Amino acid sequence: MKTSVPVAFFWKKMESLKEYFDRRASSWDEMLKYGEKIFQLTEVVNWFELVEGHSVLDIGTGTGILLPLLRKAIRIKGKIIAIDFSFKMLEVAKLRQGHVENILINATVESLPFQSDLFDRIICFSAFPHFHNKARALLEMVRVLKNGGLLFIAHLKSVEELNQFHHHLGGPIAHDFLPTPKRLQSLMKECGLCGVSIINQPGKFLAKGEKR
């Protein structure tokens, strides 16, 4: 009986978040002014140390804003799978498909529908604060990451800037906070990542860990 409240809360939170992102899918890029941030987004993709032929899992892809840039980095030989729990967001992301189609899947990070040791890179851009069970999410990401593969959590804001931004937006994401660098570093190590490094500065947050 003790677990019924957390489980019920989890599903209520999930449904609330899905509704929130579904309603805003068509205007999300405009709200975040992504059209004015092509240079910054290109730089974000450069953070991920991608090479031709890499297999990439884009966690919480949203409207797929990074998909064309990821494809450019890994080229035709590479493989991209993008997941999001918002079906409406994925509908927008589908419109970004070029001549090489990426695989878009409606799924949650806490239960990834993939076999283990599958991806060279796992990226989580502008999504990690919205995961209710962050430890479970990290364990799943590490599970599907290849040995020697890298996991990245990235934002175009610092922890302080991002948490203030979410609080300002209010609603279901008002308390969707990014952990402090110290806490996140500990969490990533506990979930099986090595060589964890974190950059937290105005306009940039990047956490990196390797599976060994």
Image (spheres, grey):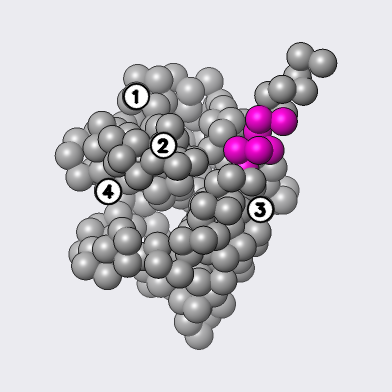
Classify the position of the N terminus by image quarter.
top right
180 or 55: nearer the eye?
A: 180
Secondary structure of the residue carrying numbered label 2: loop
Q: Quadrant of residue 208?
A: top left
Nearest to N terminus: mark 2 or mark 4: 4
Which amino acid is tagged 4? Leu
Q: Residue furthest right?
A: 1
Q: Which residues are magenta?
A: 8-14
Q: Residue furthest left?
A: 202
Q: Which residue is mark 4?
A: 156
Of discs 3 and 2, which sits in the foreground?
A: 2
Vertical placement of 184 versus 105: above or below? above
Q: Residue furthest top?
A: 2
Query: What label does residue 174 carry, if any?
Result: 2
Q: Check if mark 3's residue and mark 1's residue have beta carbons within 8 Å.
A: no
Q: Which residue is mark 1?
A: 180
Nearest to N terminus: mark 3 or mark 2: 3
The percent coordinates of residue 65 (x first, y second) are: 40, 65
Instruction: Tell me if residue 196 is in the magenta stretch.
Output: no
196 or 201: nearer the eye?
A: 201
Q: CA distance from mark 3 to mark 1?
A: 27 Å
Q: Which residue is mark 3?
A: 107
Secondary structure of the residue carrying numbered label 1: loop
Which amino acid is tagged 1? Thr
